[in-house]
Image (cartoon, rainbow, N blue to C red):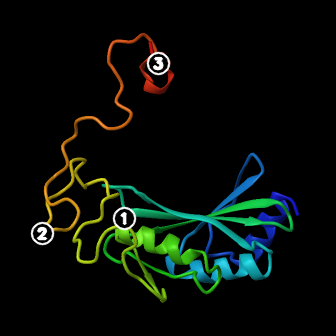
Amino acid sequence: MTAKQLAKKIQRQFKEMISDAIEFRGELTVEVLDANQILEVCRYAKEQLDFDYLVDLCSIDNDDEAPRWTVVYHIYSYKYFQHLRLKVSVGEEESKLPSVTSVWRAANWHEREAFDMMGIDFVGHPDMRRILMWEGYPYHPLRKDFPLAGKPSEMPDVAFTDPVPLEGGPFVTTPGNKDSAGREPRVRNPE
């Protein structure tokens, strides 16, 4: 099935709920206009169009724009060797989406990460708890309004309780070299 055939099937099924499909380099992107319909669209993509693999689920913080977040579902069909990208926007007020763990079990960890890092809640998720930060941590570190130095925590003896200094790291570059290859520490001669 080509991307154009796929786009026609999706648009026939969800006339009012999705945007026009955009094709780029053989990959299709469709925006789901109603966030509450994402589960239905994902279920259709898996059961009727054979998109059997959830490659990734990621979230984008649009910061000052409305709606605040865009959640992107990257799915793949092994039968047709075709990629499909589903995008859905969710505002800061509602910040809830239906969980797609009933469609793809792999969504469990992806949704937990989006919850932990951005604060997007997935309704109906079987185990909605933090996956990277500790329980009780009040912030969401991948939001654009989160400071680069971090925020202090009121939890003693847990990870860092003070902001992390922004000085250095494993790949600190030296200023003044002519090009980016010269600044990369892994290409320097050990002489």
Dot 2 lies on which element? Answer: loop
Residue 80 horizontal/vertical position (percent): 86, 64
* Residue type at the position of mark 3: Arg
- Find disc 1 in the rendering and name its residue: 117
- Give the residue type at disc 1: Met
Q: Quadrant of residue 161?
A: bottom left
Which is nearer the N-term, disc 1 or disc 3? 1
What kind of element bears circle 1? Answer: helix
Residue identified by numbered label 2: 156
Measure the C-alpha gap from mark 1 to mark 3.
35 Å
Looking at the picture, does residue 135 appear above or below residue 144?
below
Q: Nearer the viewer, mark 1 or mark 3?
A: 3
Q: Where residue 74 sits in the image (x, y, percent)?
A: 63, 63
Report crowding for label 2: few under 14, some 14 to 19, many 20 or more residues within 10 A (C-alpha): few
Q: Is residue 80 left or right of residue 37?
A: right
Placement of the N terminus among the 4 image quadrants: bottom right
